[in-house]
Amino acid sequence: MTSPAATLTSFPLVVIGAGPVGLAAAAHAAERGMDFVVLEAGPDAGAAVGEWSHVRLFSSWSELVDPAARRLLEAAGTWTAPDDSAYPTGGEWRTAYLQPLAEVLDGVAGSAVRFGTRVVGVGRAGRDLMVDSGRESDPFAVHVEGPGGRERLLAGAVVDASGTWTSPNPLGADGYPALGETENAARITYGIPDFRDPDVAARYVGRHVAVAGKGASAQGVLVGLGRLARTDETTRVSWLLRRPSVGDAFGGGDNDQLEQRGKLGQDAKAAAASGFVTTVAQFRTGSVTAQADGRLTISSVDGQQVTDVDEVIVVTGFRPDHSFLSEVRLDLDPALGSARVLADQIHPDHHSCGDVAPHGHRELTQPEAGLFLVGMKSYGRAPSFLAMTGFEQVRSVVAALDGDLEAADRVDLVLPETGVCNGAGAFDDPDAVALSGAGGGCCGPAPAAAAPRLEPQLVTIGAPSGSTLPLAQEESSSGCCG
């Protein structure tokens, strides 16, 4: 059997995604003198982060820079480190950190960061999914589409940090687009609009807007629409919830160790209680139809209807794209699509943000030797990912690929106890959701048996280019704890 470390002497490490976690993986590879190629579908580093550039993160700069990346940037001598205590927007994170880091990494001898290059397939060179013989000793074949057309690259190992940003969950309650959802796409927005942009604001002000989703992204949308309602009292919102009640959607407030997330929950709670918001509970969308006047009717699978809707904002989370991994062997949780070993710790039915055990290369190892899914993609559909979890993941994974198992096994993950939010499995029975220290809700206090924690210094994000999506102070992304 040939180890990934041995294969990497002949072929580079391929990192998919030039987002925060993908670039961190490359930074750790650079420190170890490993050749690497970063493949990014977007035009520049953190391209997906640019799509939520208006969102301010909950976490400060001290928690948003990978340690190896910081060392490389400081050694380059051209980087001006941000104020560690400041809270950047996604745009600031991108321009002040991700893009300078990509430039430094692209200058590493024997390595490259390639933009406009989309990975369309990963397999073993000369062997399809069914072939066992020689599988672990042969390099990976990474098929890409870029400016020069279709290419086939050979890799000693592959770290997939492509995230989940490009695969938002649909409005439809079945997990597929609702009937008419695609046909009426011009009236539907996925994600958090920049309500401070005059052109964007004009689309929603004075309109009837349906907002689908419960997490922090939905709360940020309510806050943003609340500002518009103060300028035009005809603005109104129908807040569509699949659960029977709002419950503990607004988190822990003053008890949230991420102070700005707690503030968002309180601001959203105030917006939801105002006259411009109507909460429509236990609403699972089955169809979207156009009315004679051009507006929309949204119908639930049980016959409820919300009529005269001008615009729809869908903030129901994200899912991973495994389509380009069909020729490699994966072991994923059947419900979450996450690394199977992590599923019980991160499932929103019974997950507390404080009880994810330290994890690294061993938990992320796939049956396909040398392939690792990291960052938000390693969590699948679970919304509870933290950026520094990703930084620690890739530190461990790259060390293991380099054959340094001692360093790879020194994984230290410290998570905060945060505000309470429901697990998905209880949305039919709000009384079943534990709001106490029993750990029954995601982001609730961890069970008493959990290991002691240090004071947390973690970023809370959910999933973008490369791998992560933020939660913000004003208009935030979806997800519990991340």
Image (spheres, grey):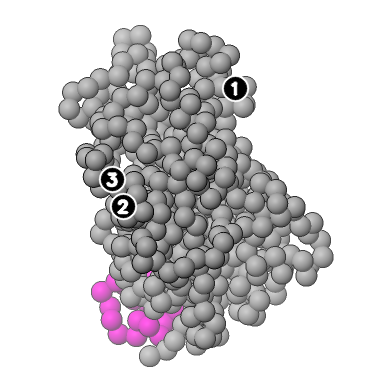
Label 3: which secondary element: loop
Residue 306 visible to the viewer: yes
Q: Tell me residue 70's x, y (percent).
A: 70, 65
Residue at 44% x, 41% y is 251
- Whether residue 128 is in magenta: the answer is yes
- Whether residue 433 is in magenta: the answer is no
Given contact means CB atoms under 8 Å apart, are the residues at marks 2 and 1 in contact?
no
Q: The N terminus lies in which quarter of the figure?
A: bottom left
Considering every residue shown, the one lying at the far right of the view is 77
Residue at 41% x, 82% y is 138
Q: Which circle marks residue 440 in the picture? A: 2
Q: Residue 130: name its quadrant.
A: bottom left
Front-lying residue, 127 or 472: 472
When the figure is inspected, residue 357 is found, relative to residue 408, above or below; the finding is above
Q: Is disc 1 surrounded by few (<14), some (14 to 19) or many (20+) residues within 10 Å?
A: few
When the figure is inspected, residue 265 is found, relative to residue 99, above or below; the finding is above
Pointer 3 or 2: first along the chain? 3
Q: Which circle marks residue 199 in the picture? A: 1
Front-lying residue, 370 or 236: 236
Q: CA distance from mark 3 to mark 2?
A: 6 Å
The residue where tag 3 is placed is: 433
Q: CA distance from mark 1 to mark 3?
A: 41 Å
Given contact means CB atoms under 8 Å apart, are the residues at marks 3 and 2 in contact?
yes
